[in-house]
Image: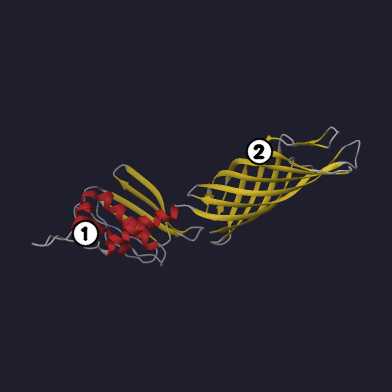
């Protein structure tokens, strides 16, 4: 014989435990209570929780809200010597309660769960007419909804980010710029596409200080980031490739011209993201810039005026909007 013990942060409800199965549930008042988790588990097993069990199971679930405003379940299930730990995230706490009931029932007696679901969803055939299966019980719909809801929370979410900053070593002197990024965030990874503009300073010939050019940089970026997080804080580590053009406009000669030269670089660096609300976040970033394609410029009939350095750096800050 086995028994059940339930504990909830919202209500002190429990069933006296016996050896074999132990289930603990801790959740805020907005969530289903311990008795609800017990009832859902019994319905899936097709028998009372104090009945005979296929496996000895101990499960503990603790629910809280994460930095994104979603419900997060820290779940630990032990079956004999085997221990499984995982985190489920859903927009509704009800979904997490049903998910835990399903996982506990499957860990205890998976065959009983299959038989129970089959018995609930299949109707007996009529003598002369083909049978039509009734809709699944509401508890089963809630349980499957829990899996779908938790799965949705792990799917991608999009965001837009606008930043401003400064760079050193890509254009003459210190160059100010701005960038716009679109991001696709997965559970612990994000992919980004961006466009940016940096306005450089003037570069001049040492022997002819009145002759030179003004340089600007236009580029697009594709990169990927690992996104370890700690509550509202995320610490992306990003790397990618940048391709664009460096544009030079001459001055100090009778006939001035504008020329463009291809630019390409590897970009890598850390960032910091702080969730301010469910919609807005603050972003701070520092990158190393390693050019692979280095543009060069010169004025007609004169020597080389400027060649992009072999390395540079950037720092920027801005705000991100979750879509």
Circle 2 residues within 10 Å: few <14, some 14–19, many ≥20: many
Q: Secondary structure at mark 1?
A: helix
Rendered location of residue 152, percent (x, y): 42, 55
Depth order, front residue of 148/217: 217
* Residue 315 shown left or right of residue 303 in the figure: left
Depth order, front residue of 177/72: 177
Relative vertical location of residue 91 with respect to residue 266 in this rendering, above or below:
below
Residue at label 2?
265
Rendered location of residue 216, percent (x, y): 75, 46
| Residue at position x 58%, y 55% in the image | 160
Answer yes or no: is residue 227 visible.
no
Depth order, front residue of 127/280: 127
Circle 1 residues within 10 Å: few <14, some 14–19, many ≥20: some
Q: Secondary structure at mark 2?
A: strand
| Residue at position x 63%, y 46% in the image | 220
Answer yes or no: is residue 134 visible.
yes
Rendered location of residue 252, percent (x, y): 89, 44
Relative vertical location of residue 181 with respect to residue 11 in this rendering, above or below:
above
Q: Which of the numbered marks, if any, corresponds to residue 121?
A: 1
Determine the CA span between mark 2 and mark 1. Answer: 59 Å
* Residue 323 shown left or right of residue 195 in the figure: left
Relative vertical location of residue 208 with respect to residue 148 in this rendering, above or below:
above
């Amino acid at each position: 014989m086995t028994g059940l013990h339930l504990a909830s942060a919202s209500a002190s409800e429990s069933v006296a435990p016996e050896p074999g199965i132990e289930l603990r549930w801790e959740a805020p008042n907005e969530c289903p209570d311990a008795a609800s988790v017990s009832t859902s588990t019994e319905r899936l097993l097709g028998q009372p929780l104090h009945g005979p069990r296929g496996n000895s199971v101990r499960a503990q679930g603790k629910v809280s809200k994460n930095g994104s405003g979603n419900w997060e379940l820290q779940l630990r299930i032990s079956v004999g010597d085997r221990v499984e730990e995982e985190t489920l995230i859903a927009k509704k706490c009800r979904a997490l309660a049903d998910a835990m009931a399903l996982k506990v029932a499957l860990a205890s007696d998976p065959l009983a769960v299959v038989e129970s679901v089959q018995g609930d969803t299949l109707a007996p055939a009529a003598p002369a007419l083909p049978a039509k299966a009734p809709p699944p019980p509401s508890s089963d719909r809630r349980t499957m909804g829990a899996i779908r809801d938790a799965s949705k929370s792990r799917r991608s979410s999009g965001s837009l980010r606008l930043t401003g900053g400064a760079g050193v070593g890509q254009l003459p002197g210190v160059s100010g710029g701005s960038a716009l990024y679109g991001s696709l965030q997965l559970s612990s990874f994000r992919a980004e596409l961006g466009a940016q503009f940096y306005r450089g300073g003037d570069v001049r010939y040492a022997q002819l200080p009145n002759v030179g050019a003004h340089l600007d940089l236009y580029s697009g970026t594709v990169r990927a980031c690992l996104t370890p997080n700690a509550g509202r804080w995320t610490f992306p580590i990003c790397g990618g490739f940048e391709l664009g053009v460096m544009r030079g406009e001459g001055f100090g000669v009778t006939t001035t011209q504008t020329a463009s030269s291809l630019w390409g670089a590897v970009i890598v660096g850390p960032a910091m993201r702080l969730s301010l609300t469910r919609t807005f976040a603050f972003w701070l970033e520092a990158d190393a810039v390693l050019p692979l394609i280095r543009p060069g410029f010169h004025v007609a009939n004169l020597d080389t005026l400027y060649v992009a350095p072999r390395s540079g750096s950037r720092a920027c800050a801005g705000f991100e909007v979750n879509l």
